[in-house]
């Protein structure tokens, strides 16, 4: 069983600040962490390996420092890791990201299951998983909360839906996104940390992936972020004064006006 | 301060802290309240390779020593001393094998301990024999094919939870303590049962039980060391484990100090945080000084032991006595600074104060250890005269 887990390094949003002047994220002094949802993906990958044997390869696209999340992945059970890093990848939206990841996974050749987190805590779109499946022409199951069984090229999983869950079978290889209910991620181990310290993590660039430069990074993105802003809080309370009777009738008028009553 | 730790030791300490904060902290009050053995946390510690820390590499450990163990115990105890002792008791329980076991015994058992698959315990104390170890009555009669154990051990940490027990019993009762030997007894051996779990003041997450042996036959190869060596071995092993109790005490005191600084910064009386009161500041400073002194004493004895030094009995006793007295004083002062709130279970310091008391009692009461230190001082002076 060859398992690929996709991980992203994200700013720790528990202490995020937005510069009120420029309306952009204050990156200084913000800790980078593994996208929390991806830790469940990694844990599930490691558990599948423990049950069925095989290898777990962690991949991440990001700047050079994203290597940290891959080292953490190795410390927590991944066997190998690959970093996809190139100036040309910068500014990628979900489409360009999925394209880049798909090229890398194709380059790995051997894979049976690809596991992603359900979404990132910075982008929050939840699109990369399904886009990746589409580009790899693989079947896809979102919001997986349990992997019941893998046998004979099939996998049976439970996926969360709004008012319950569905049990699905999918042929392998397949792409899954997982929810946090699926497991409790383990912490790194001492042997894992030692291994992670000395692990050689290859960096694959645009050239090595043989990508079409118009499909990666900002130029490959179908969407543009035009502005990031705090929603304006418009509060205009109105205080009625005078006789209680007249206050009540004015309130009723107002509510009618607003078609609330 | 980084002390003089190696890179590996820093990694170990940091990971132990992370486990303590992420896995122990959220459940410590509940474990204390329900007196529940922390199996889930033992599993986390095992997964993180923490049981490998004190086992040599030949037996699937990471080859650390006394200091490495102390660092883990300190970090766990900073959050919950009950969890810390459940872990540390395994280090003591298998130290008999590490120090005196045959190659075969080590190969058979240590890898399972290293993986965290089997906890261990150390059983010396009996109802009649606390500080006076020579009063033990449990016997191990030699018979065809092995030894038959009879007797009851009392107050045994990890009793009932551990799989492997080091038990001190008399092979030659007529020789008194010189007739004691050490044995390895596995859980589920016929004739080996447990008493009820003790209801304790502190360390309530840890399990303390009686071990009851009724015609319990164990194979001959389960003797550790030679017949008659039991007492000397037990004393040496306790010397070696005392810095661990010191580390437990240091962690506790550190946890109490940190909680107290936090509280004193928030608690407003007379219009100001109480940390601006000089009376509180002086107490906090004294707490910090004592904790740091205790830590350095524990680390330096542990490091000395790891360097291969043979004579460390007194220093190990000093580290245990000083650190445990510090933990008692610091946790008591912590409750004092918290005021009435500190007396309530809503804050962690009342638990820390309850947990601290035992560190002055077990693995040699502080009185017994002070007596032993004074005895050595006298002996040395007499020798020179
Ligand atoms: C929570 C807990 C866990 C424990 N875990 C273990 C374990 O895993 N394995 C194990 O074998 N034992 C264990 N013990 C037993 C522990 O080591 C003993 O309780 C300790 O050695 C003291 O013995 P005692 O309780 O019989 O007290 P006693 O020996 O009766 O002491 C009573 C008082 O007399 C004083 N005293 C006695 N003798 C002297 C002396 N010579 N000089 C000066 N003062 C003296 C003591 O300091 C104390 O104040 C545990 C105990 C507890 C409470």
Image (cartoon, rainbow, N blue to C red):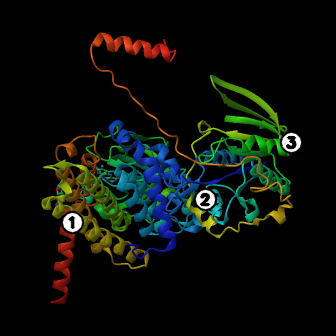
Residue A182 got which mark? none
Q: Are marks 1 and 3 on the same chain?
A: no
Q: CA distance from mark 1 to mark 3?
A: 65 Å
Ranked by sequence position, the earlier of labels 3 and 2 is 2
Judged left or right of residue B312, residue B111 is right
Which residue is depicted at the point 47% across and 68% down?
Answer: B10
Looking at the image, can residue B147 be seen? no
Q: Nearer the viewer, mark 3 or mark 2?
A: 3
Judged left or right of residue B191, residue B344 is left
> Secondary structure under badge 1?
helix
Q: CA distance from mark 1 to mark 2?
A: 38 Å
> Secondary structure under badge 3?
loop
Read off the chain for label 3: A
Please identify the quadrant where the N terminus of chain B is shown: bottom left
Ligand 1 quadrant in view: bottom left
> Secondary structure under badge 2?
helix
Q: Residue B35 at what x, y percent from top left?
A: 35, 39
Location of residue B103 by image quarter: bottom right
Q: Are marks 3 and 2 in contact (CB under 8 Å)?
A: no
Residue A137 got which mark? 3
Judged left or right of residue A256, residue A186 is right
Read off the chain for label 1: B
Question: Dot 1 corresponds to which residue?
Answer: B285
Q: Would you say the beta carbon of the disc 1 residue lies within 8 angstroms of ligand 1?
A: no
Residue A72 got which mark? 2
Please identify the quadrant where the C terminus of chain B is shown: bottom left
Looking at the image, can residue B233 be seen? yes
- Report crowding for label 1: few under 14, some 14 to 19, many 20 or more residues within 10 A (C-alpha): few
Q: Residue B73 at what x, y percent from top left?
A: 40, 59
Which residue is depicted at the point 24% across and 69% down?
Answer: B289
């Amino acid at each position: 069983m060859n398992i690929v887990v996709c991980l992203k390094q994200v700013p720790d949003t528990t202490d995020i600040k937005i510069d009120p002047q420029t309306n952009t994220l204050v990156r200084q002094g913000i800790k980078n962490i593994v996208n929390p949802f991806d830790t469940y993906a990694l844990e599930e990958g490691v558990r599948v390996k423990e049950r069925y044997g095989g290898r777990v390869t962690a991949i991440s696209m990001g700047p050079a420092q994203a290597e940290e999340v891959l080292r953490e992945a190795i410390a927590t059970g991944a066997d190998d890791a690959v970093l996809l890093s190139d100036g040309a990848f910068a500014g990628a939206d979900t489409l360009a990201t999925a394209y880049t990841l798909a090229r890398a996974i194709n380059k790995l050749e051997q894979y049976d299951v690809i596991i992603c987190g359900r979404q990132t805590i910075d982008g929050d779109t939840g699109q990369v998983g399904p886009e990746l499946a589409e580009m790899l022409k693989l079947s896809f199951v979102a919001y997986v909360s349990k992997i019941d069984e893998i046998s004979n090229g099939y996998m049976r999983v439970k996926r969360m839906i709004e008012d319950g869950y569905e049990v699905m079978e999918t042929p392998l290889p397949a792409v899954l996104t997982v929810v946090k209910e699926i497991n409790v991620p383990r912490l790194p181990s001492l042997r894992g940390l030692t291994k992670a310290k000395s692990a050689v993590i290859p960096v694959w660039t645009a050239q090595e992936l043989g990508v079409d430069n118009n499909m990666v990074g900002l130029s490959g993105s179908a969407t543009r972020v035009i502005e990031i802003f705090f929603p304006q809080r418009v509060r205009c309370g109105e205080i009625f004064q005078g006789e209680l009777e007249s206050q009540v009738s004015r309130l009723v008028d107002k509510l009618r006006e607003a078609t609330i009553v | 301060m980084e002390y003089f730790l190696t890179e590996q030791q820093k990694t170990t300490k940091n990971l132990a802290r992370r486990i303590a904060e992420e896995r122990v902290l959220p459940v410590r009050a509940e474990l204390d309240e329900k007196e529940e053995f922390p199996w889930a946390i033992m599993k986390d510690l095992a997964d993180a390779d923490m049981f490998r820390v004190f086992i040599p590499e030949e037996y699937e450990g990471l080859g650390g020593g006394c200091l490495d163990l102390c660092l883990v115990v300190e970090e766990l105890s900073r959050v919950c001393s009950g969890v810390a002792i459940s872990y540390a008791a395994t280090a003591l329980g298998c130290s008999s094998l590490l120090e005196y076991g045959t190659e075969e015994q080590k190969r058979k058992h240590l890898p399972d301990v290293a993986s965290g698959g089997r906890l261990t315990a150390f059983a010396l104390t009996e109802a009649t024999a606390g500080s006076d170890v020579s009063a033990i009555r449990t016997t191990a009669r030699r018979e065809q094919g092995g030894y038959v154990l009879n007797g009851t051990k009392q107050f045994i940490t990890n009793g009932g939870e551990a799989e492997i027990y080091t038990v001190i019993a008399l092979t030659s009762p007529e020789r008194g303590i010189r007739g004691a030997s050490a044995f390895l007894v596995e859980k589920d051996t016929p004739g080996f049962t447990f008493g009820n779990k003790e209801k304790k003041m502190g360390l309530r997450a840890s399990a303390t039980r009686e071990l009851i042996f009724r015609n319990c036959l164990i194979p001959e190869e389960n003797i550790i060391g030679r017949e008659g060596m039991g007492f000397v071995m037990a004393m040496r092993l306790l010397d070696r484990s005392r810095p661990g109790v010191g580390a437990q005490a240091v962690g506790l005191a550190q946890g109490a100090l940190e909680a107290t600084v936090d509280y004193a910064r928030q608690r407003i009386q007379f219009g100001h945080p109480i940390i601006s009161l000089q009376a509180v500041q002086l107490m906090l400073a004294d707490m910090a000084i004592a904790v740091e002194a205790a830590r350095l004493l524990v680390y330096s004895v542990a490091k000395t032991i790891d360097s291969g030094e043979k004579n460390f009995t007194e220093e190990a006793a000093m580290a245990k006595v000083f650190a445990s007295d510090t933990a008692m004083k610091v946790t008591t002062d912590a409750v004092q600074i918290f005021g009435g709130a500190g007396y309530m279970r809503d804050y962690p310091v009342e638990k820390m104060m309850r947990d601290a008391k035992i560190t002055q009692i077990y693995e040699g009461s502080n009185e017994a250890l002070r007596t032993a230190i004074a005895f050595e001082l006298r002996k040395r002076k007499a020798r020179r005269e």
